Amino acid sequence: MAKIFVVDDDEDIRELLKYNLEKNGHDVVTCENGIDCLDKILLSKPDLILLDVMMPGLDGIEVCERLKSNSENQDILICFLTARNEDYSQIAGLEAGGDDYVAKPVKPKVLISRVNALLRRKEITKPIDPEVIDLEINREKYIIIKEGKEIHLPRKEFELLALLSSRPNFVFKRDLILETVWGTDIIVGDRTIDVHIRKLREKIGDKYITTIKGIGYKFNE
C-alpha cells in the first residue's frame, strides 16, 4: 500500500481517482489546489502525487518545482495529469522533475498500471553508491557523467540504465524491464529492449551491461 496524493481542481476527477486507487489498496489524500497540496505534505509525506498541470493559482509545474527544490522531497514520485495532446505540458512537467504523465480523460486501468509501474520502480531502485561503478547517474537532469564528460540520454534509455544499475549483478528479467520502464498499458516487444541496450552500449561502452540469454540483462560492478 502506498500513500498517494491526488491534486486536481475538479472534484469529480478527484473522487474518481480516489475511488479507483483505494479499490487497489492505496491510502489516498485529495487536494483541490497546489497550495493545499504543499500544506498537506508538511503534515504527511506521500509516496506518489498525481498532479494536475492546469490549476488556478499555483499550477502543477510550479508545485513540482517547489517540491523538487527541497532535497527531502526528491524521492516523491510525481505523475502529471495532462489534457490529451497537450505536448507542451507533458514536456514541461518532465523537465520540472516529474516522473510520468497520464492524459485526460483518465482511464482507470491505465492509471492503475502507471501507478503500479512507478511504485515498483521506486521499490527496486535506490541511490547508486559511487564507489560501485565509474558512472555518475544524475536522475534529475537525465544525464550520466563518464570520465568527466556528460552524456545525454533519451528518457527511456536513461530509465533503462538507471534500473539496471540500481542493483549491480542482479539479473533483471525482460518482462520486469518492460513493465517497469514502459508500463503494461503500452504494447512493445522484446526487440524494443534489445534496441535500447544496443544504443546504451554504443554510448557508454560494452563492459557495463551483460546479456543473460533467454532471461534478461544485468549491470556489472
Image (cartoon, grey):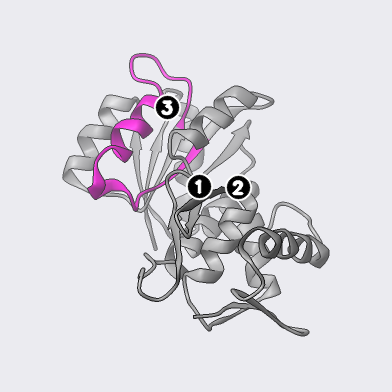
Q: Position of residue 31 (x, y in %)?
A: 33, 32
Q: Which residue is mark 2?
A: 155
For the residue carrying disc 1, how many other residues have a C-alpha within 10 Å: few (<14), some (14-19), or many (20+)? some
Question: Residue at (44%, 34%) from the top-left corner?
Answer: 51
Q: Which mark is residue 61?
A: 3
Q: Is residue 127 visible?
A: yes
Q: Is residue 216 left or right of residue 64?
A: right
Residue type for callout 3: Ile
Whether residue 3 is situated above or below residue 121 in the rendered picture = above
Circle 3/circle 1 CB separation < 8 Å = no
Q: Which residue is mark 1?
A: 142
Q: Comparing marks 3 and 1, which lies closer to the viewer?
A: 1
In front of the other: 58 or 129: 129
Q: CB under 8 Å between callouts 2 and 1?
A: yes
Q: In terms of secondary structure, where does tag 1 sit?
A: loop
Occupied quadrant, residue 43: top left
Q: Residues within 10 Å of mark 3 (few under 14, many from 20)?
A: many
